[in-house]
Image (tube, rainbow, N blue to C red):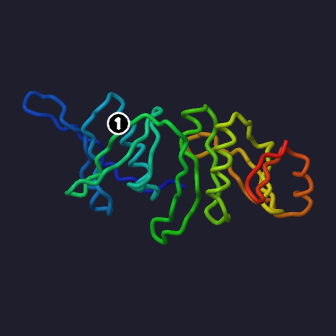
Amino acid sequence: MHHFFDPSIKPIVVTDLSDKIIAVRTFGLEHYGYPNLIMYEVFRDYETLFYMILDSIFSLEFDTQKIFMFNNNEVKFTLDKQNNAIITMSKQSEVKITTYRDPFSQEIVKHKTKGLSELFGLPEVEISGTENEGIEILAYVVNELNSGAVIDDSTSIEIEGNFYELTTRSDRFGNSFLEISKIEFVELKQQYRQKNRIKMKEGLRRIK
């Protein structure tokens, strides 16, 4: 299923009288309830970044508080007095955890890491927003990876008797990520007891 996209909204190059590029920006996003995008520090591959952001807007995933990753850079947004979203970029130095909310109900949809692929060449990890201690689980996984541990879809997580598995998934762009989900059935719990396990009880610790 394809989401709606307005092809008339695209990055427009703004120049001065000498044809020097001043900025790249959009027009018309205010009609959809979003701020227009403006970039003053323009780089060669700006169109790819703009269309990535526009895709997130029309798929209802855009948030000015959200940090995008583009070519190993953090993309951030600052609202100016005209409610335009000014795009700035900086090198990412650490893995972050981003919370995604439903744009209408504001309920938490999921938590996901940002930076594992850029900094470590590893797939990002996400967990449903309905899971208790979701952020804490991701934070521990990130800490384990920073410490040199190997965590993949052969690893399970135990939280006070509840077991979670890691499953490799792909997003709509074909990028792989690991999804953490609860194992519901007793027989599956017994199966995953034999796997490499992370245990959370009275503080998180790794079980060899």
The mark total stands at: 1
Q: Residue furthest left?
A: 17
Dot 1 amino acid type? Glu
Does 58 sit above or below residue 10? below
Say which element carries label 1: helix
Residue 142, position as x, y percentages in the image: 64, 44
Q: Nearer the viewer, residue 57 or 134?
A: 134
Does 39 sit above or below residue 181? above
Q: Quadrant of the N terminus?
A: bottom right
- Residue at 76 percent of width and 43 percent of height: 153
Q: Nearer the viewer, residue 205 or 78?
A: 205
Residue 64, position as x, y percentages in the image: 38, 54
Q: Is residue 193 left or right of residue 135?
A: right
Q: Is residue 49 left or right of residue 18?
A: right
Q: Residue furthest front?
A: 202
Please rate how many residues cluster around mark 1, counting C-alpha atoms within 10 Å: few if below 14, some from 14 to 19, many from 20.
some
Residue 143, position as x, y percentages in the image: 65, 43
Residue 170, position as x, y percentages in the image: 64, 44
Q: Residue furthest bottom?
A: 105
Q: Nearer the viewer, residue 95 or 76?
A: 95
Does 130 sit above or below residue 166? below
**Which residue is the site of mark 1?**
47
Q: Is residue 13 left or right of residue 77?
A: left
- Residue at 68 percent of width and 36 percent of height: 147
Residue 35's quadrant in the figure? bottom left
Q: Nearer the viewer, residue 39 or 169?
A: 39
Residue 163's quadrant in the figure? bottom right
Q: Quadrant of the C terminus?
A: top right
